[in-house]
């Protein structure tokens, strides 16, 4: 009986130690990520009050690298743009709206470089473009759609360059581009891409 009690006690201690170890690791993991989070000051200034040092790629406010948000407004006083900055670099969310208050672009920055999902929208609210950025370069799938929600393009990219099957469709659903990009070479019907273009949110045929 004593032997069984000792074994049971030892087993419980082992599980407790393992759980404590897991919890400590989890806490440390959380602390590391919290410490790495860049906090943008909760203040806003007009974009026109900021000045850009192009050599540094740094935005200044009153001769100091800016930390906060910049805003722009349309002529009807509706919000046109809101950008985040940290130490003078674009950071966090960046959004633009139309005069009607429709979100047109939603993007994210990390020290002046686009990162994560970039989206643009039509005036009716439908998604126009969606692509992922890593360190300022497009990575993976890029989707584009017509204003009615029908897909117009499906591209695949690697470090900002086309890699893989690239496709595009006319508004009637007809496939008019279908080629493969591989190691800088193109295989397929790429020339069709020069036949159509987007102008004023409408697809037109070029000469």
Image (cartoon, grey):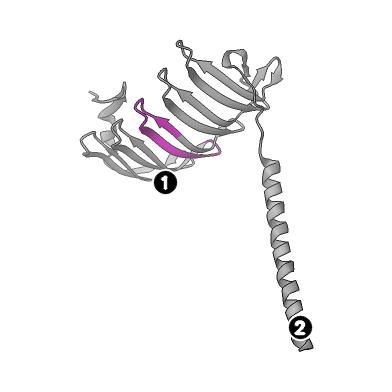
- Judging depth in this view, the residue of 128 and 16 nearest the camera is 16
Q: Which residues are magenta?
A: 119-136
Q: Residue under circle 2?
A: 5
The spot of residue 55 in percent (x, y) is 63, 22
Q: Residue under circle 1?
A: 183
Residue 24 sits above or below residue 71 on the image: below
Residue 185 sits above or below residue 120 on the image: below
**Residue 60 placement: quadrant:** top right
Q: Is residue 135 inside the magenta stretch?
A: yes
* Residue at point 75%, 82% (across, down): 7
The spot of residue 187 in percent (x, y) is 31, 45
Marks 1 and 2 sit apart, C-alpha to C-alpha, by 68 Å
* Residue at point 59%, 30% (across, down): 112
Secondary structure at numbered mark 2:
helix
* Residue at point 53%, 28% (across, down): 94
- Judging depth in this view, the residue of 108 and 28 nearest the camera is 28
**Residue 2 placement: quadrant:** bottom right
Q: For this view, does 75 lie left or right of residue 135?
A: left
Tag count? 2
The spot of residue 1 in percent (x, y) is 76, 89
The spot of residue 20 in percent (x, y) is 73, 63
């Amino acid at each position: 009986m004593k032997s069984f009690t000792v074994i049971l006690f030892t087993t419980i201690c082992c599980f407790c130690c393992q759980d404590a170890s897991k919890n400590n690791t989890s806490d440390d993991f959380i602390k590391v990520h919290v410490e790495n989070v860049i906090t943008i000051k909760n203040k806003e200034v007009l974009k026109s009050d900021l000045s850009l040092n192009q050599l540094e790629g740094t935005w200044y406010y009153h001769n100091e690298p800016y930390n906060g948000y910049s805003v722009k407004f349309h002529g009807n006083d509706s919000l046109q743009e809101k950008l985040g900055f940290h130490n003078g670099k674009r950071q966090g969310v960046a959004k633009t709206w139309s005069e009607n208050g429709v979100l047109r672009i939603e993007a994210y920055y990390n020290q002046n470089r686009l990162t994560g999902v970039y989206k643009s929208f039509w005036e009716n609210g439908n998604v126009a473009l969606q692509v992922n950025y890593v360190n300022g370069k497009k990575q993976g799938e890029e989707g584009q759609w017509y204003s009615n929600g029908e897909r117009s393009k499906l591209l695949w990219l690697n470090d900002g360059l086309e890699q893989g099957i690239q496709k595009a469709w006319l508004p009637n659903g007809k496939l008019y581009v279908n080629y493969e990009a591989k190691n800088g070479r193109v295989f397929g019907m790429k020339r069709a891409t020069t036949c159509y273009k987007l102008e004023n949110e409408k697809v037109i045929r070029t000469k």
